[in-house]
Amino acid sequence: MNKIEQAKKVYDTIEPPSSYNHMVQLAVNQTDSVKSRHRHITWYKPILAGVGSLLATCVILLNTSPAFAIATYKIPVVGDIARVFTFKEYQVSDTSYDIQVEMPSIRNTGNTELEKRANGQIQDKIDHIVESAKLRGKQIIDDQLAAGSTKDDIVPFHIIITYDIKSINENTLSFVVNNIDSAVTSYNYQTFFNIDLKTGKDITLSGELGPNYAEIITDSIQKQMEQRVQANPAWVYNVTDRELKEKVDNMKFYINEAGNVVISFDKGEISPPPLGIQDFEITK
């Protein structure tokens, strides 16, 4: 049995995580996720009808099963890019909150210090989100009870923490941890990790775009907003040129597969919530 057949055999033993159906349904309900790629939605065993299809979907599987990721490290063709996988999944629940977590981990970079630092940052961020969600859930329940609701009427505050890889190659790794809040309407709060795998350091806007990065970013975003409004007259952006310039150093961003910086604003941050997450690619 060759390595491809061994990897396929490992995959055939994988069962979807217990939170799979709920996570897919929540993702489908998000208006701001229509254009995003979701690993869970595309993960179906019929895709793996042949060995060729197995290779085509290998990157997706690496991000849904540690077992498959470990098996895949043994395949030289893809082992060099298999650097992120689901480290663990767990759920924390009581009467006031329901928190589902899918935690990523970085491996196989050849830089143990980088992995230790990045994985520690991921752990700290997710721990903070979980603790904040617990407090918020309890506060929401208290507010509902104070307003006259009964315990039978109360629905726990629900959050899903998951992640998506934006790009990965021999030089850079870019991924996002999503904090999907479904208390009333669905919101996705994003935390991006952009790593230079050669130096082990975080990628910066100035490093990618040069010393005039602030001007480059604000000019590009302004032009793209104007184009979007022209194409969709009902769209509105509630941010000025001056406010964009003031936000530059705190803007969230990722590196896409083309190697370009993409500035990403959370739902409701610069436009009405129905417009969802707003991404702006800054071409070089």
Image (cartoon, helix red, strand yellow):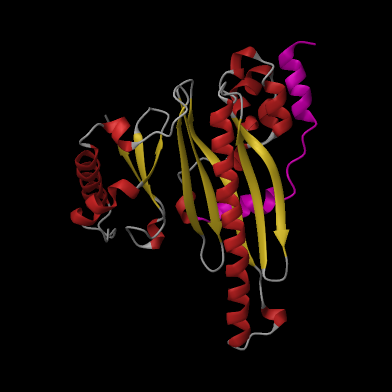
Is the C terminus in the top left, top right, bottom left or bottom right quadrant? top left
User: Is residue 14 a member of the stretch shown in magenta?
Assistant: yes
Tell me what residue is drawn at x 73 percent, y 44 percent. 17
Name the image quarter holding residue 109: top right
Q: Nearer the viewer, residue 119 or 266?
A: 119
Say if 105 sits above or below 141 in the image. above
Q: Nearer the viewer, residue 171 or 154?
A: 171
Q: Which residues are magenta?
A: 1-30
Judge left or right: residue 183 versus residue 226. right
**Residue 245 placement (x, y as % from top left):** 22, 50
The single residue placed furthest to the top in the displayed view is 2
**Residue 170 visible within the image:** yes
Tell me what residue is drawn at x 57 percent, y 31 percent. 115
Is the N terminus in the top left, top right, bottom left or bottom right quadrant? top right
Say if 23 sits above or below 46 in the image. below
The single residue placed furthest to the front in the displayed view is 113
**Residue 183 placement (x, y as % from top left):** 56, 67
Tell me what residue is drawn at x 73 percent, y 67 percent. 94
User: Is residue 121 a member of the stretch shown in magenta?
Assistant: no
Judge left or right: residue 110 versus residue 276. right
- Mark count: 0
**Residue 252 placement (x, y as % from top left):** 38, 46
Judge left or right: residue 84 versus residue 259. right
Name the image quarter holding residue 221: top left
Name the image quarter holding residue 239: bottom left
Tell me what residue is drawn at x 61 percent, y 69 percent. 137
Q: Which SS does the magenta portion mostly show? A: helix
**Residue 84 placement (x, y as % from top left):** 59, 32
